[in-house]
Amino acid sequence: MTWTTRSQVVRADPGDAFTFVVGGAEDGIVQWSWTFHPQGRGTVVEQSWQLLRLDPVLGTTRGDLDALRDYMTNSVEAALLSLARWIAEE
């Protein structure tokens, strides 16, 4: 799935957390968050997303939402693995 959206950053604490809401803070659809926790010589990065309200663009049935959840789970895992590879190479 690929689409273009307008988003609003609702938290940006360097070294701690970053969060944006797709559609804006007042009427958003999905919130994406990353948090960073020091661990040993590295950092644990946690990425999450939360569906804030239903919207036809995301699907209209339980099956659509289950498919979206599964897609997003795979997307989050792929993003974190890419981040880890990039850090290892730097």
Image: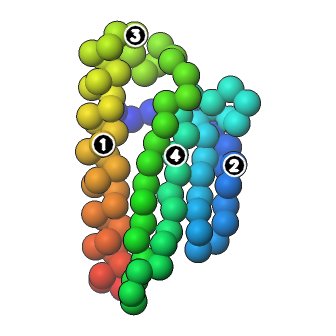
Label 3: which secondary element: loop
Mark 2 touching mark 1, by CB under 8 A? no
Amino acid type, callout 2: Val
Q: Is residue 28 left or right of residue 49?
A: right
Q: Is residue 58 visible?
A: yes
Specify which label sits upstream in the sequence, 4 or 2.
Answer: 2
Mark 3 touching mark 4, by CB under 8 A? no
Q: Which residue is mark 3?
A: 60
| Residue at image location 40% in from the left, 10% down from the top | 60
Mark 3 touching mark 2, by CB under 8 A? no
Mark-to-mark CA distance, 1 and 4 = 12 Å
Amino acid type, callout 4: Trp
Mark 1 touching mark 4, by CB under 8 A? no
Q: Which residue is mark 1?
A: 73
| Residue at image location 61% in from the left, 40% down from the top | 21
Total numbered badges shown on the rendered structure: 4
Q: Which residue is mark 4?
A: 32
Report the front residue among 46 and 30: 46
Label 4: which secondary element: strand
Specify which label sits upstream in the sequence, 3 or 1.
Answer: 3
Q: Which mark is residue 45?
A: none
